[in-house]
Image (spheres, rainbow, N blue to C red):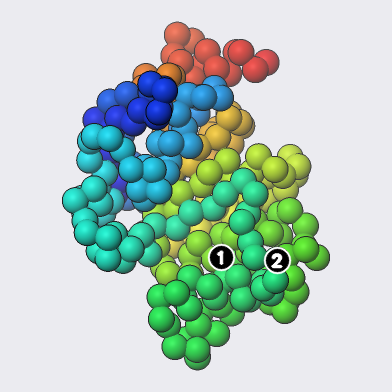
Amino acid sequence: MIELHRLRKIYPGGVTALDGVDLHVAPGEVYGVVGRSGAGKSTLLRAVNLLERPDSGTVRVAGQDLTALAPRELRSARRRIGMIFQQFHLLSARTVAGNVALPLELAGAPRAARAGRVRELLDLVGLADRAGEHPGRLSGGQRQRVAIARALATDPAVLLCDEATSALDPYTTVEILQLLRDLNRRLGLTILLITHDLGVVQRICDRAGVLEAGRLVESGPVAGLLGQPESALSALAQAVR
């Protein structure tokens, strides 16, 4: 579903964010990328939908090489890739329903179809009774649920999660992770997430990779990696104890 081949990204000043990264995420898989601050996690995630265009390498999603697409084709391809963020990025002037409807408006969906899809999505994330409220009246967990519903509006095959639970308390974090896992199973959604929290990886991910200085130094099943004392994932786990 997601195939990254030899991705390389160097920022001005010679800072190497990605150094020949190869990564494969299978359809329907939940895959987590962990690493210390500055390892290149956010750059890697944003390269998947080309919000950060790599200097070299290829990005394939559902068999389509995004790096080879013209701008119009890329905009269309991005509708199949949802994304949620640490700070939610909701529009305060819009209601919950208005925020969820925004991608559908941009895609030119008819008003009646938008309304039906918004109701369906808000019910899916447990916020059917909050459609008319504004984000400022919601808790952090509820805002992230709105963001998830918005990300799913155009029926994406892939959901990218950029530190999606970092701003939440532990109890709410568990609730959001349970929701993501449920969506993964019910919708067949492929999820790629980045996090600094190993608890997130242990709770939700099928496989994980460790990024160090822009390189993916290991990748494999979470339980298998944590069962190897010499693995990079085990080393990170020991470092935070």
**SS for dot 2:** loop
Q: Which residue lies at the image location 31% right of the left edge and 66% below the top edge?
A: 76
Q: Is residue 46 above or below residue 218?
A: below
Q: Which residue lies at the image location 48% right of the left edge and 78% below the top edge?
A: 105
**Whole-percent x, y for residue 180 in the image:** 55, 52
Find disc 2 in the rendering and name its residue.
Answer: 92
Q: Point out the residue furthest to the right here.
A: 137
In this rendering, position of residue 79 left or right of residue 67: right
Q: Which residue lies at the image location 45% right of the left edge and 53% below the top edge?
A: 159
**SS for dot 1:** helix
Find disc 1 in the rendering and name its residue.
Answer: 149
The amino acid at mark 2 is Ser
* Near-viewer residue (238 or 117): 117
The amino acid at mark 1 is Ala
Answer yes or no: do the residues labelled 1 and 2 have beta carbons within 8 Å?
A: no
Disc 1/disc 2 C-alpha distance (Å): 16 Å
Mark nearer the N terminus (1 vs 2): 2
Q: Is residue 225 above or below residue 33?
A: above
Judge the density around disc 2: few (<14), some (14-19), many (≥20) Cα neighbours within 10 Å.
Answer: few
Q: Point out the residue furthest to the top here.
A: 230
Q: Point out the residue furthest to the front here.
A: 13
Q: Can residue 73 be seen in this view?
A: yes
The numbered mark at residue 210 is none
**Whole-percent x, y for residue 21 in the image:** 30, 28
| Comparing labels 1 and 2, the label whose residue is closer to the camera | 2
Which quadrant, please, contains the C terminus?
top right
**Whole-percent x, y for residue 175 in the image:** 67, 50
